[in-house]
Structures are given as structure tokens and as C-alpha cells.
Amino acid sequence: MHDTGTGSTGNTAQPSRRTVLAATAGVTAALAAAGPAHAAAPDDSRLRALVSRMTLEEKVGQLFVMRVYGHSATAPDQADIDANLKEIGVRTAAELLAKYRVGGIIYFAWAHNTREPHQIADLSNGIQKASLELPRGLPVLISTDQEHGIVARVGKPATLFPGAMAVGAGGSRSDARTLGRIAGAELRAMGIRQDYSPVADVNVNPANPVIGVRSFGADPRAVSALVAAEVAGYQGSGVAATAKHFPGHGDTNVDSHTGFPTITHSRELWEKLDAPPFRAAIAAGIDSIMTAHLMVPALDDSGDPATLSRPILTGILRERLGYDGVVVTDSLGMEGVRSKYGDARVPVLALKAGVDQLLNPPDLDLAWNAVLTAVREGELTEARLDASILRVLRLKSKLGLFRSPYVAQGGVDRAVGTRAHLAAADRIAERTTTLLVNEGRLLPLSRRRYPKVLVVGADPASPSGTTGPPTGVLAGALNELGFTATALSTGTAPSAATIAKAVAAARDADAVVAATYNVTAGSAQKALVEQLVATGRPVVAVAIRNPYDVAQLPTAPACLAAYSWTDVELRSAARVIAGRVKPRGKLPVPVQRADDPEQVLYPVGYGLSY
């Protein structure tokens, strides 16, 4: 569930300069005490001095990154106060920081953290102020999942880009770098300094239920290049990028949110297929890497998920790949990490494996006390905690949080959702739409011959605060391009009555655009397209998620892959349909035949044009 609405923030105004100076005085004094002050980021000796002054409880807190409900750090809505009390035992973000001294906070739309950019900036400032005013207070590393495409926590009016597989279809490193640079600048302006992106998984399994279009594609070399480019873009804008999900989540048919996947790749195959994008990210200077809650017996045959595996996180990631940045777990509330051990053991085992940040445990009090107890009883050493805390502090220092923890509202106006940024997103999207079928040169669709267009199809909930529903966005875009288009939502599983209604409407139109969403052999969406084609009206199928839909739609005379149902990708598809731009995208994954999955119907690199 995602809350994408906007409204008044209820936050206090931007902190005054006097407030900022007072709040940062403790950290500044501590740094100065360790050596002469410099304009540059503090060096390790000063950061180590900060660590040495922390209590054990404060050290434990620095390792956690936690969710918190509310649009304000101190005055959230009552429903969010109630949710916080129920799940965390505190009322507000400020109370969370005071009680647990957490080192990071993650924003979610469903937690009502991301109503609109100015509110997000106020929330970020409120969080920093609350933390810095504590004894030995430290700046907070605020993070979110802003992958773009189908996973984004900050919606309009922020700039939303095509997702990874669409970028993979465009194949441009420059576009990937531009995406990261602009998206990073907008996140930083709102006080978000760590983005859990890009996805470095190589999606070789069409049945993958959790990665799919979140991946750049199936070719490890192409994925590696785009991962490195996006990392450069984000980090060049002063936001920590996060390659995920190590050691690779691209070949699974189980969602680690709800189950415990196993990757059966041999060590040799892992080296060739899964490792290259992570190697590329490390070579690009990636600031953080996220773990995967899955088992890879070829890398560790203990049966433990990678998140809890010392052979994988320390033996491979740290020692073999030479990575010394921050390692963050995927959410500890996911079933993939909870299935073998209890919630009290998971954070301790993750730290023993080599993790630095513990993300979003289901029960923070249980997890926090479990780590504290493990240190007091000798299972974890304080030195082990210190090593991770130092990595986290180095990252905070690199990102400028010690020098400048607050953001200005003017910076939001200058950076977020600007006309230039939105235009860049449209240009990138135009290079991603992929034309797979075009019988009889139906496309581009002539406005003279087919002026009246019916848009039907699946209308999944907007993934990222875009306009939606997809049929409405497509119809609106076609209207702007000179057609007379109407939308009829038929859903992902249309009933016989709904299909009959769509067929009747199609007879009154000159052409039909059908938005499809993960079509399977027995899908009612397939029946819908077949019956629409049977009317004799030309039908253009637009796959608004996985490009594999085309294999299930052999009767459709034209098929496009848009890779997501966000506005920017749907507008691009409409411009391609209308002939305003030529289709330029090439498949970044192979599409297998529906009747014989061993045979490739359309290979990587396939794509038609006009």
C-alpha cells in the first residue's frame, strides 16, 4: 500500500541558522577535540574519537536503519502516532531517535513520510535536529528505495524516470548516468542521502516475481555498464548509491518478501553471471551494497541466507571482491531472512556475517536488545561494532552530513521536478520503448485513418506516485497527440462481461490500444486481446510491465514493450504509437516462445523501428 497524496505538512518552518549551529555544536566540538578543524570531511582519527565517546547503547543504535510513521518528526497525524506506538513503542521520529539512537531512518510512502517535496525536506530537517540535539548527537543517514520505474517512494512532483529494464532497453550509459545525477540531486535536496538503487541483479528468469523489470536485463556485461553509470550519477550528486541484492537475485521464482529462495547457480556460473555487476559497482566506488535474503549453496552450503552468511559477505564480498564500504541488509521484516532463525537471532548473525547496517527489523526493541545482549555476553565484541560504526560514520562524513546536515526549502524549488529534469526524463523514455511486432506496418497509427481510439486494459495501482490509471494516462497522451481517445479499464483479470463490454466499445472505435500486465497462458487478458482482434479493428498491445507478454499475444498485429506503467513510460509509448518519435528500444532480455520455453522467440537486442 502506498500513500501518494499531497497536502499541508504540519511541520515547523526551516530551522534557523542559530538552531542549526546549536544543534551541531556537540558534534563539531567532538571533532575539534580530536584535532584541528578542517573544511573537508573529518578523517578517521576524528571519527574514531567520536566512536570512543559513544556508550554501548548508542553504538548499537548506530547500526539500525528504521522506518517510522508520519510526515513530521515531532507532530505526525494521530493515526501515525498510533502506528508508531503499536510497532515501535514510540510516538514520533524524535522519540525513536531519543530512545534507540538509530543511525538511519528509511522513508516509505505507506508510512506517510513522502507526501510532497517541501514536507519531505521539513521531515528530514526535523529528524536531523532531533538527533543532533541529543547528548553526543550524530547526523542521521536518511534513505529510501527510489529505483524509478515500478519502485519509487517519492512521487510527483519529483522527477520520475523509466525503470531499470527500460533503461536497459535504451542501452545508453549516458542516460543511466543522467538519471542518477538528476535523481540524486532531487533526493539530496529533500534530505535523503542514501538511495537503495541501482538493482545489480541480472534477470535471467522470466518467472522472477520480485526483480523482473527492476533489473537492467539479462546480459551481465550490459547490466554492469549501466550499474556503474548510474552509481557515478548518484554519487556525483552527493547521494550514496546502493547496489542490490548481493550475491544476486536475478534467477529465482520465489519472492524473498514472502518465501526463502534458493539460487542453484554453480560457483563458475555465479562468477560469470551474477558477480560482474557487483564488481563493476565496486570499481565505480559504490558507497553501499545491500544483501539478499536467499540461499546460494555453491557459495555457502550451510543453508543460511546470504544476509547471515559470513562466507558470502566477508569471504567473498569483503575479501575476494575487496569491498570495504557499507553493507546494509535488505529489510529484516522479509520472510526470506526470518524463516530459519527468530527475529532476535537475525541481527546478531547478520553482524557476525559482516553486515554494517540492519534495515527495518520487524521488532526494533527485540533486535536492539538482542545485539546489546550479544555484546554484553561476549558473542559480539565491541570492536566488531566499532568497525561497522566507523564505516557508517565515514559514509556520513563523505556525504557532508557533519558539515551540512540540513536542507533549504529554496534548494527544493531549484532541484525537484524542474522543467529541465522532467524534459530529460521524457527524452530518456523515448529511447526505451521497444517495438516487437508491427504487421502490415500498422504503426505508426494514422490519425486520419484511425482518429477514434479505445484504450482498454490492466490498471494496476500507480507504483510511484504518478498520475494513473495507465489506461487513462495513455488515452490522455493520445488525445494530446491529436486522436480522440477514450479509456475503459478492464483490469488484470477481466470477466466475460467485462470482455464483452470492451468488444462492444471496440466496434465503435477505429483502433484499440490494449495495456497488458504479466499475461499468462490462461490469462483472461489474453482472451480479451484475442476477442478484440476478432472484431477486425486494429489492436496495439502495450506490455506495461514484463516484455514477455508478447509471447502470449500471437494474434495482436502490433506489440510494444513499455516496461512500466509510470507516466513517463506511458507517454513515450503513446508518442511511438502516434509516430511522433521512432521506437528505439532493444530487448534487454530474451523472450521465449509460449509453447516451447526452450526456444527464443525474440533475442536480446531485438527491436523494430519505423
Image (cartoon, grey):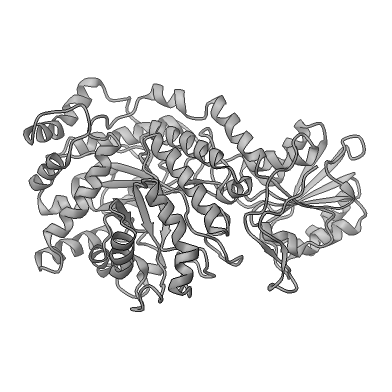
Q: Residue at x 83, y 57 (%)?
A: 556
Residue 217 in the image, given as x and y percentages of width and height = 57, 56
Q: Indicate whether 35 appears above or below 504.
A: above
Q: Residue at x 75, y 39 (%)?
A: 582
Residue 224 in the image, given as x and y percentages of width and height = 49, 52
Q: Indicate whether 197 appears above or below 484.
A: below
Say whether residue 249 is visible.
no
Q: Quadrant of the C terminus?
A: top right
Residue 589 in the image, given as x and y percentages of width and height = 63, 58
Along the viewing direction, whichever of 501 and 449 lies nearer the viewer: 449
Res 190 quadrant in image: top left
Image-based side of 603 in relation to 302, left or right: right
Image-based side of 345 in relation to 519, left or right: left
Along the viewing direction, whichever of 584 and 407 lies nearer the viewer: 584
Residue 468 in the image, given as x and y percentages of width and height = 63, 43
Res 73 quadrant in image: top left
Image-based side of 511 in relation to 127, left or right: right
Q: Indicate whether 461 appears above or below 8.
A: below
Q: Residue at x 18, y 31 (%)?
A: 24
Res 306 quadrant in image: bottom left
Image-based side of 449 in relation to 413, left or right: right
Q: Indicate whether 444 appears above or below 221.
A: above
Say whether residue 52 is visible.
yes
